[in-house]
Amino acid sequence: MTQQRTVPKSAIHNSQSAIQSIAYTEYHPRWYRRRISTYWWIRSWAYLKFTLRELTSIFVAYFVVLTLLQIRALNQGPEAYAEFQEWLKTPLLVALNTVSFGFVLFHTITWFNLTPKAMPLRLGGKRIPDVLIAAPNYVAWLAISTVVAWFLLGE
Amino acid sequence: MAKRSNEPFPWALFSAGGVVAAFLIPVLLFLYGLAFPLGWREPPSYQHTLALVRNPLVRLLLFVLCSLSLFHWAHRFRFTLYDALQIKHLNEVISVLCYGGAIVGTILAAYLLWNVP
Amino acid sequence: MAETITLELARYRPEQETEPTFQSFDVPFREDWVVLDALNYIKDKLDGSLSYRWSCRMGVCGSCGMMVNGEPKLTCATFLSHYMPGPVRVEPLRYFPVVRDLVIEMTDFMVKLQSVKPWIVREEEKSLSEGEYLQTPEQLDTYKQFSMCINCMICYAACPVFGLDPHFIGPAAIALAQRYNMDSRDQGSQERLDILSQHEGIWDCTFVGECTKVCPKHVDPAGAIQQYKLTATKEWFKDFLMPWRAK
């Protein structure tokens, strides 16, 4: 929507025939549009939570990069792989991975909690409560995580 | 009437990526990023890891996980840039960098997983 | 006992200023007064030049949406007692152009609403002699929540995407489109899909979810939008894999 400008008074005197439209235009409201702040996303707790949720994608991508580096080290042989594991022990990587784990967990939780909103299910004409759609996701997540851990920890 | 947007395609990838990332990444990052480096558990040996990753099903799973997660990031990050930094006018550049990055990562993942000894 | 509460009202008089200013008023505090009562008191007794919209004063017409202490609310449903000891800051509904004082310009919403065809669309109307369109309670239940929308536009005031891009069709329009898409009597889904599958349709939405939080009628527009994204995506894949199919 564009801002309307009032017509200068002189325009009225210039044209008798156009007097009606100009007289109306002179009193057309001049709208005010407030500009959105660059920092709108930290202005409220709700917006901040949303922003943190969106930022989890960066840490998801970071995990993929880490995984690809790990597979590359694996391909290069036991010495390279051991070096990679040592690198993971450095304080920088541990700090980075701790933060990343927090974000990745936040992704999982927010994802499962939002699933019922996007996929409401009905049974016998009534809508299934959101918590009953989110809960199986959590259960499946715990089950899958256990299976993965079992494969990695069992020798 | 303008043509219907093709947005559903990247959105579908974003959703699929979100699902696999939600289920698989936390446990993997916890083990490899925290538990093993900090000594809470003994990490699997090189041989054990190699045997696991050699398995074609595991390789497929890792490929799907890496690729879809990257497309999840690409789509979400693109909108984050639009909204947080308000640079929607650069949308062609952003799209190329995001989805292009995901494609590059997918190719890399395929190459690395194909070449597991 | 004569308690008062201060209201800080945004004033904007385009004939005398280029930016909004604030004006404070002290109004009597009554336990059962809502913000709208205070505004009416101010207009009646203190400053008759104040401009604002209101009508039913009972939360069904959708006219009195404004920002109260930074949150979008229906002023007829927001009690002064909630804000004691005050002050209460009242501003026009966020993300819309301000016409005057607390009145915003909403024509663009009306255009968007019309564009999604919020009515029953039939390929062929039944003749009167054939009787009414029948619908079971279960069929009603699938879309009833979305039909509760009173077009107050409070969801637009909460949506940062709309704030950043006024072309975005917005939560209420999409929720109302869904109300008709899910109505068993309607046959207009494909027509609505053409409008809604534009970038300024559903695809601008990033599921912030604030629209649902602030909706005074619990319509859940965010849910409607995400469900519609799934529908639109299924349609896109169907079109992609079977381009010959009749729409």
Image: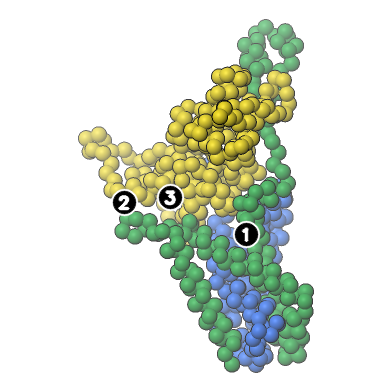
Q: Which residue is mark 1?
A: A53
Q: Which chain identifier belongs to the yellow chain? A: C
What is the secondary structure assignment of the residue under circle 1?
Answer: helix
Q: How far separated are the C-alphas under marks 2 and 3? A: 27 Å
Q: Are marks 3 and 1 in contact (CB under 8 Å)?
A: no
- Please give the letter of the chain rendered in green: A
Q: Which residue is mark 3?
A: C247
Residue located at (65% from left, 10% from top): A19
Instruction: Say which residue appears at 70% left-offset and 10% top-offset.
Output: A12
Q: Position of residue A137 (x, y in %)?
A: 48, 68
Look at the image and tell me whether residue C197 can be seen: no
Chain that the image shows in blue: B
Residue A118 in percent (x, y) is at 48, 57
Residue count near mark 3 (Cα–Cα under 10 Å), binned few <14, some 14–19, many ≥20: few
Q: Residue at the spot x=52%, y=59% of the render?
A: A114
Residue B90: x and y in percent read 72, 50
Amino acid on which disc 1 is placed:
Arg
Amino acid on which disc 2 is placed? Glu
